[in-house]
Amino acid sequence: MEREDDKQLWDVLGHVPEPTLSPFFVRNVLRRVRQETARFQRARSWFSLRRLAAASAVATVVMATAIATHHPISRTTSANDLDVVAKIDPQDYDVVADLDELITWDENTVWEDKPTL
């Protein structure tokens, strides 16, 4: 920007006094830096080994409790299970008997074959 572009602006800028620094400027800046470091140290000290060990122990107990309470319930025979058995068609028994004979025959024929090694 040239001085001729905006003469009034340059005149106002020419009359503004230069900023002066306080004699305590450096001290104030260093104090702020130290305060920021102290905040970081406080946050870092929260994650100490003692607290992390306690937190992991609590997490382990919570998980063990959740697993112990949500285990599958053992099945016991009920009246409904007996009704299902009573409703089986008699023809199914014949099929099951035929399958049992087939399995028995298959097991016996395996031993009768001579291996060819």
Image (spheres, rainbow, N blue to C red):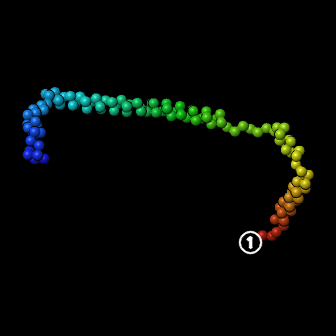
Q: Is residue 46 left or right of residue 8?
A: right
| Any part of residue 116 in sight | yes
> In which image quadrant can residue 35 be found?
top left
Image quarter hosting the C terminus: bottom right
**Relative to 84, does residue 60 appear above or below in the rendering?**
above
Q: Is residue 20 left or right of residue 36?
A: left
What's the amino acid at mark 1?
Leu
Measured as percent of width and height from the top left, residue 94 is found at: 90, 56
Residue to which mark 1 is pinned? 117
Please report the residue visible at 61 percent of the width from the left and 33 percent of the height from the top.
Answer: 65
Q: Is residue 19 left or right of residue 82?
A: left
Q: Nearer the viewer, residue 54 or 24?
A: 24
- Mark 1 is surrounded, within 10 Å at the Cα level, by few (under 14), some (14 to 19) or many (20 or more) other residues, namely few
Please report the residue visible at 86 percent of the width from the left and 45 percent of the height from the top.
Answer: 85
Q: Nearer the viewer, residue 29 or 112?
A: 29
> In which image quadrant can residue 91 be found?
bottom right
Measured as percent of width and height from the top left, residue 17 is found at: 9, 32
Measured as percent of width and height from the top left, residue 24 is found at: 16, 27
| Any part of residue 104 in sight | no
Please report the residue visible at 12 percent of the width from the left and 31 percent of the height from the top.
Answer: 20
Q: Nearer the viewer, residue 117 or 5?
A: 5
- Element type at mark 1: loop
Measured as percent of width and height from the top left, residue 84 is found at: 85, 44
Count of numbered tags: 1
Please report the residue visible at 9 percent of the width from the left and 41 percent of the height from the top.
Answer: 7
Q: Is residue 21 left or right of residue 45?
A: left
Kindly give the residue lying farthest to the bottom in the view shown: 116
**Relative to 105, does residue 84 appear above or below in the rendering?**
above
